[in-house]
Amino acid sequence: MAITYKKCFTCGSLDVAKIVYGSPTVEAFKEQEEGKIKLGGCMISEESPQYHCNECETEWTVDEAIDAAYNEIVGLRASVGGFFGGYYDVTIHFQAKLLVWKYSLESEPIEKELSEASIKHFIDRLKRLELLNWKSRYEDPNVLDGTQWKVEIIREKRNLRRSGSNKFPDEWKSFCALIQEITGLTFE
């Protein structure tokens, strides 16, 4: 899992407290003094923050943490295929607004310029597919040949890799449809 809710996306601190709402107990007051929790009062709404940075005082919700995690992505590489059928490879550079699609059994890659709106739509769909919450490896040990796939989530600090052999996350078909939508080309 790549989404770290308890990391401040303003200053990067891991000294973060969960915000607790409701009538506090004596133990809750002690935990607040130790910086383990922050008391949020008795009133709670959908917009109420859930985390508090003890370093810079920033507060945020789970949704804001999810947005921050997806905003760290600067590109994506994905490939799928098998030995006899060839491989489809797609690389998307968000900042350069460029997409490169290749099929291993054809010689020339196809490049496509992307609009800011199409990239934003693509990232929003990745959130709905919960790409950052996919396991790092999916494998069916009972099949020796077949379909292999890889997704590399490109970030400025550390890239994340997801892959599989004949086994896929539940969202895989929707992911392939999203790749086909943005490329206008086959990805299966």
Image: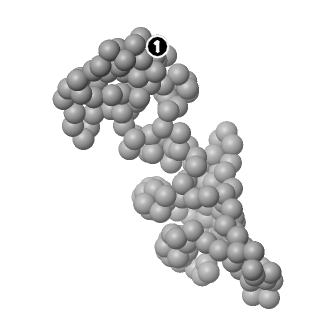
| Relative to 66, residue 30 above or below | above
Give percent across and percent down for residue 26.
32, 15
Give percent across and percent down for residue 97.
56, 56
Q: Amino acid at mark 1?
A: Glu
State whether residue 183 appears in this view: no
Q: Residue at x 21, y 37 (%)?
A: 45
Give percent across and percent down for residue 94.
57, 53
Image quarter of residue 90: bottom right
Judge by depth and name the residue closer to the eye, 14 or 34: 34
1 lies left or right of 38: right
- Which residue reaches farthest left? 43
- The residue pinned by badge 1 equals 34
- Which residue reaches farthest front? 26
Judge by depth and name the residue closer to the eye, 107 or 20: 20
Q: Residue at x 23, y 23 (%)?
A: 23
20 lies left or right of 11: left
10 Å crowding of disc 1: few (<14), some (14-19), many (20+): few
State whether residue 10 appears in this view: yes
Image quarter of residue 12: top right
Judge by depth and name the residue closer to the eye, 185 or 160: 160
Give percent across and percent down for residue 156.
65, 41
47 lies left or right of 138: left
Location of the C terminus (image quadrant): bottom right
Q: Secondary structure at mark 1?
A: loop
